[in-house]
Image (cartoon, rainbow, N blue to C red):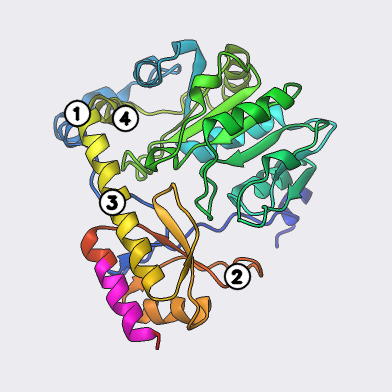
């Protein structure tokens, strides 16, 4: 604690990211892609004109936004970009959720959401997942200051189909509904095709997962021009040059190689399917997943004990201390070799 801090800083409970170990471990704890970015990204890095870095980047990031617009079949004016989806979410909380009515969210979801509420002084209401660990879309009340949830949800992995999101939007048209699609490419349906019909829908995405660019910090949002303008107003009141030249060039190159993207995603999905079968054969309860991770409960040892045992064997997964989540482990999908090493280690650790 410091006497120099603003009073609000004393009350904050910051988000705790997954561990980034310095020693060499099998890293299955932060949902990074196990495969490298598209080859064209390497070409950009090798041939980038470093002299251009003396100049500020395009404050509107038009080249990147145009590439995203083409990818998602939307207008340039419907696209916003930021330094990772976390920044885009932070700007969205400021732009849309500081309302008189509370913001509604699942009680189990991305743990940055409550942090933003605390930071911005936003009243929130957390609603429980249903009995099958799914976000209960029917539980969101009509009177609210906004709704936010991840689809697929984290850390559980469940995803609602687009039709279910549309039914929610039919009931909820008076405030912003933000659908966080960080993991959507791993087998779920994007809600982007709904944005023209529902001007209160904002869809957020990231290059960190399916595009293998977590180290560059690139995120985006797609929505009505009205919502994008709101994000731009907040962004330009904070940092008018968010995307640097190198990151933009790498992202554009990544979007151009659709064939590599699809092979990469399909490889993760295939390994996920194999991993689920292996875990279930060993007595794990594994929730259905449309993401690049699985949420699994060992039944022969505790989640905490297995987490510690795997760490001793050089494998790091994610364990949450919250009471509801403590029996489970969230396991990122790695390469086939890494997942085989995980299974072999589990066989050594549990009876």
Q: CA distance from mark 1 to mark 4?
A: 13 Å
In the image, which is nearer the foreground, mark 4 or mark 3?
3
Residue behind mark 3: 270
Q: Is residue 130 magenta?
A: no
Q: Earlier in the sequence, mark 3 or mark 2?
A: 3
The residue under the point 21% across, 31% down is 259
Q: x%, y% of residue 164?
A: 60, 33
Distance from Cα at disc 3 to Cα at disc 2: 30 Å
Which residue bears the numbered disc 2? 321
Task: Give the distance between the C-alpha atoms of the residues marked 2 and 1, in whole angstroms.
Answer: 44 Å
Residues packed near mark 2 inside 10 Å, few (<14), some (14 to 19) or many (20 plus): few
Pointer 4 residue: 251
State which mark lies toward you, 1 or 4: 4
Q: Position of residue 78 (x, y in %)?
A: 51, 15
The residue labelled by disc 1 is 48
Number of other residues with Cα within 10 Å of mark 1, as a class: few under 14, some 14 to 19, many 20 or more: some
């Amino acid at each position: 604690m410091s006497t120099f801090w603003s009073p609000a800083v004393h009350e904050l409970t910051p988000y705790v990211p997954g561990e980034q170990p310095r020693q060499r471990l099998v890293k299955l704890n932060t949902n990074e892609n196990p495969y490298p970015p598209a080859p064209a990204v390497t070409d950009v890095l090798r041939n980038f004109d470093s002299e251009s870095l003396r100049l500020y980047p395009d404050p509107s990031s038009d080249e990147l936004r145009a590439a995203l617009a083409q990818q998602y079949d939307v207008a340039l004016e419907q696209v916003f970009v930021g330094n990772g989806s976390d920044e885009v979410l932070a700007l969205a909380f400021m732009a849309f959720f500081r309302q008189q009515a509370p913001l509604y969210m699942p009680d189990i979801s991305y743990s940055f959401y409550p942090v933003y509420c605390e930071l911005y002084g936003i009243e929130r209401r957390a609603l429980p997942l249903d009995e099958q660990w799914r976000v209960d879309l029917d539980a969101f009340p009509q009177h609210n200051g906004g709704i936010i949830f991840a689809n697929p949800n984290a850390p559980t992995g469940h995803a609602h189909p687009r039709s279910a999101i549309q039914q929610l939007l039919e009931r909820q048209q008076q405030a912003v509904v933000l659908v966080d699609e960080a993991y959507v490419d791993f087998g779920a349906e994007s809600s982007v095709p709904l944005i023209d019909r529902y001007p209160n829908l904002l869809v957020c995405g990231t290059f960190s997962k399916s595009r293998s660019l977590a180290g560059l910090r690139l995120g985006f949002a797609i929505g009505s021009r009205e919502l994008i303008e709101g994000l731009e107003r907040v962004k330009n009141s904070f940092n008018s040059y968010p995307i640097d030249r190198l990151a933009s060039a790498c992202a554009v190159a990544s979007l151009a190689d659709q064939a590599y993207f699809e092979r990469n995603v399909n490889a993760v999905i295939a390994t996920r399917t194999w991993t689920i079968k292996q875990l279930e054969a060993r007595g794990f309860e594994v929730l259905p997943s449309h993401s690049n991770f699985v949420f699994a409960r060992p039944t022969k040892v505790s989640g905490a004990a297995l987490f510690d045992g795997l760490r001793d064997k050089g494998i790091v997964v994610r364990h949450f201390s919250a009471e509801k989540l403590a029996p489970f482990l969230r396991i990122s999908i790695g390469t086939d070799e890494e997942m085989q090493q995980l299974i072999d280690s589990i066989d050594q650790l549990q009876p």
